[in-house]
Amino acid sequence: MPTNPLAYLGQQLDELKAAGSYFRLRELESACEAVSHADGREVINLASNNYLGLANHPKLKEAALEAVRKYGAGTGAVRTITGTLDMHMALERKIAAFKHTEACVVFQSGFAANAGTVSAILSPEDHIISDELNHASIIDGCRLSRAKIHVFRHRDVAHAIEKLAALKDEPGRKLLITDGVFSMDGDIGPLDQLTEAAEAHGAIMMVDDAHSSGVLGRNGRGTVDHFNLHGRVHVQVGTLSKAIGVLGGYVCGSKDLIEFLYHRARPFLFSTSHPPAVTAACNAAFDLLVEEPERIEKLWDNTRYFKAALKDKGFDTGVSETPITPIQVGEAKMAHAFSAALFEEGLWATGIGFPTVPKGKARIRAIVTAGHTTAHLDQAVEILAKVARRMAILP
Ligand SMILES: *Cc1c(COP(=O)(O)O)cnc(C)c1O
């Protein structure tokens, strides 16, 4: 018998199990809704990024079905071959107008947008100044670019300026990059001050608005609108996978930036374009952001209500300023056990531990949506408090 050259993977999985960070995939058995069916249970769903409840919206579904009837199931190639439908261009124009930028390019995912863009616009002699908690797709884009990476402490503008100042006489371009909203803590990046710093040091400013698209700013235009920085942030990334409810990522900026990405971004050039159903549903979602902004108000009403109720029960919800609500637990094992016990009681909220968050900072992450009613949130808080007392997370 030859030995198994992949045996080390099994050993590493055993280590994950010992550390309490091994997981099994939960199976959603219904549409992603405020109350969903998963693993044979009906649960209040506080685990998704479906902020506005658009993932199962009739108008998105109808648009998708119509697109399938007219254009079929797939596009047959990458964007530069047969994979650009008229609707792809229409969506890019719509997003650019929505974001008040010259142009937009849509990628297959937010991950591809970040990784493809950073790696395309920078070279090994360039410098990236990056928040330590920036998303994995930014980190991968930075690594792929082979530019030098300078990490500043989370939301620490003075530290970012220190890094920029130290590079003053270095050759190469500088890119300052931050998440708009940080996905684990729900805090907002100091984009206003970082943009000033970028301007003062001649750096390119880039923001990843994955969790701010459809959430922050007028009609969900993101952090650039939230901080009123129109025209000053050179590269704006957004996602179509979270509040927009479907799948994809986009980059907004100048016409030159977008045309350059058409020619040089590797996921754009070498990976097949979105199927018609995806593009049509995204298109319908942007119409809803403009026509029915009350959905965003409801999201924020629910966010305030839920956070206040948790505080009232004595939970520590960290520094969040957005619908992402961490409930601090401590150790990873405890967070995963808490999450599992909540599920048994009818509440779906993800347990997150090391290495996704630092050791000792494990938490449950609850994300309210516009689709939740006050009754859902009340019930969720009751379940959280009951299970937390039973597990001695609350006194
Ligand atoms: C989710 C997320 C992404 C990736 O977006 P997808 O469209 O799911 O690939 C990128 N950046 C941040 C900050 C995210 O939270």
Image (cartoon, rainbow, N blue to C red):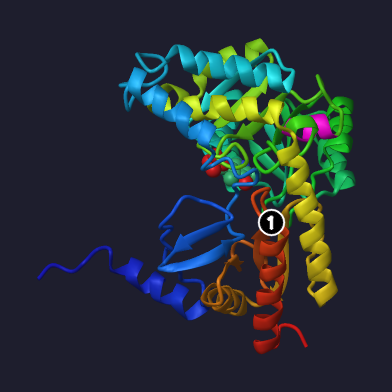
Tell me the chief SS of the magenta region: helix
300 vs 161, nearest the viewer: 300
Q: Which residues are magenta?
A: 220-226
Q: Is residue 192 visible?
A: yes
Count of numbered badges drawn on the protein? 1
Instruction: Please tell me whether mark 1 sits on a helix, a strand or a loop.
Output: loop
Please provide percent x and percent y for residue 215: 72, 40
Q: Position of residue 214 (x, y in %)?
A: 69, 36
Where ligand 1 lies, by quadrant?
top right
| 246 shown above or below 23 | above
Observer able to see residue 267: no
Q: Is residue 25 left or right of residue 385?
A: left
Whole-percent x and y of residue 258? 60, 16
Which residue is under mark 1?
373
Residue in the picture at 28% in, 69% down: 7
**In the picture provided, is 273 more to the left or to the right than 172?**
left
Q: Residue at x 72, y 17 (%)?
A: 101
